[in-house]
Image (spheres, grey):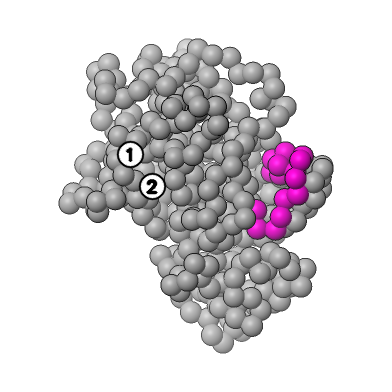
């Protein structure tokens, strides 16, 4: 089934069931008003929601109405926990290679994770509000899961059983704030503003055969200012699957229902072409593009996002239809919307952009 939360002026919104083709919705009133209620009592409430979902899809639900993603909050508007990993080690390898640094051997056996803010998520079409372009605004196209209860010490296989729902994420990063924060030794904080999630969260059966071994084997598409910049395969190159990420969290604590766990930037390896490396599937964050440019030419030239820029993140299922709906956002200043949107996506400059930090200063492994 597919679930969403509609804006109603409250902090937690109203839970709705959404049709498989994302055209219709139906309030879950009488079953649950909020998604957290369902996660807390999944065994009892999810079968009732499934019955309603079946009724919506077969035209038997009397009070269905057109589904409008612009009215959506995040499926879980605030959560008990938001923990984001870096499960695609190709991303880490690119960042390290651009710095002329080696990837520590432990990175291949022990997942990288950070704990982000979970009190204020963005809806799929909400603006990304940032104080300054100088902060280095970047998108990050990711996959995320919402868990039920997972006990401390759970194995990766046991942790997989705790996954309730899957969705997409835009884990916004302010790249130019990251170096100073990491230098303190405590990790990300101000450099990670509110994360946005797809209009709907779906149960594993909706993903079908594309869900294998704790991974989503589908392409994740990123379009920046209307131009497709990434069509990355989210499956085979995910080094740590979601069960391993959840088990990593559960090593020393219980993971409670309503926890959200992210994959980190979806990333694919390059291929050798005519004697040099090429990345035909593109990228899921600008920092990775800049690292690729550094590897290829010695320096980056793609600038970070500007006010008025847009980012669209979407994944299509095996049937060719949008699986989660699209994250479709605009970058906006705290002072308000710009009068004119930027004309070009990338502004190449001979010798790179002199006013931007080198990738070894700006990049991070998330």
| Position in image of residue 361 (x %, y %) | 42, 21
Residue at left offset 54%, top offset 33%: 187
Disc 1 vs disc 2: Cβ atoms closer than 8 Å?
yes
Q: Which residues are magenta?
A: 242-260
Q: In the image, is 241 to the left or to the right of 195?
A: right
Residue 309 can be seen, yes or no: no
Residue at left offset 66%, top offset 49%: 210
Residue at left offset 55%, top offset 59%: 78
| Position in image of residue 61 (x %, y %) | 59, 83
| Position in image of residue 359 (x %, y %) | 41, 22
Which residue, as the protein is rendered here, is positioned at the far left?
339
Residue situated in front as seen by the camera: 263 or 293: 263
Q: Which mark is residue 311?
A: 2
Badge 1 element = loop
Q: Name the image quarter holding the C terminus.
A: top right
Residue at left offset 55%, top offset 27%: 185
Residue 9 can be seen, yes or no: yes
Q: Dot 1 corresponds to which residue? A: 305
CA neighbours of label 1 inside 10 A, class few (<14), some (14 to 19), many (20+): many
């Amino acid at each position: 089934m597919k679930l969403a939360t509609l804006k109603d002026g409250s902090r937690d919104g109203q839970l709705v069931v959404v049709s498989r083709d994302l055209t219709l919705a139906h309030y879950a009133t009488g079953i649950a008003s909020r998604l957290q209620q369902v996660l807390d009592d999944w065994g009892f409430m999810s079968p009732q929601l499934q019955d309603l979902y079946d009724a919506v899809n077969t035209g038997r639900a009397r009070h269905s109405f057109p589904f409008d993603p612009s009215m959506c909050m995040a499926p879980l508007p605030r959560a008990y926990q938001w923990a984001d990993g870096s499960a695609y080690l190709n991303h880490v390898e690119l960042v390290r290679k651009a710095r002329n640094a080696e990837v520590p051997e432990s990175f291949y056996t022990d997942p990288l994770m950070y704990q982000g803010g979970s009190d204020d998520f963005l809806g799929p079409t909400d603006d990304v509000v940032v104080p300054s372009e100088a902060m280095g605004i970047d998108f990050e196209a990711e996959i995320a899961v919402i868990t039920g209860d997972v006990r401390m010490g759970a194995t990766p296989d046991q942790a997989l059983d705790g996954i309730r729902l899957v969705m997409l994420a835009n884990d916004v990063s302010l790249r130019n704030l990251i170096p100073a924060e990491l230098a303190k030794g405590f990790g990300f904080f101000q450099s990670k503003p509110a994360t946005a999630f797809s209009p709907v969260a779906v149960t594993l059966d909706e993903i079908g055969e594309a869900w294998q071994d704790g991974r989503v084997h589908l392409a994740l598409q990123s379009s920046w200012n209307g131009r497709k910049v990434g069509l990355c395969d989210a499956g085979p190159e995910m080094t740590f699957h979601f069960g391993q990420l959840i088990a990593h969290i559960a090593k020393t604590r219980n993971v409670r229902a309503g926890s959200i766990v992210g994959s980190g930037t979806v990333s694919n390896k390059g291929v050798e072409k005519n004697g040099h490396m090429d990345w035909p599937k593109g990228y899921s964050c600008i920092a990775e593009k800049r690292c690729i440019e550094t590897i290829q030419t010695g320096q980056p030239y793609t600038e970070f996002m500007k006010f008025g820029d847009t980012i669209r993140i979407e994944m299509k299922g095996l049937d060719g239809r949008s699986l989660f709906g699209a994250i479709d956002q605009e970058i906006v200043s705290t002072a308000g919307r710009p009068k004119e949107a930027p004309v070009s996506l990338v502004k190449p400059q001979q010798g790179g952009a002199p006013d931007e930090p080198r990738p070894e200063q700006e990049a991070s492994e998330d």
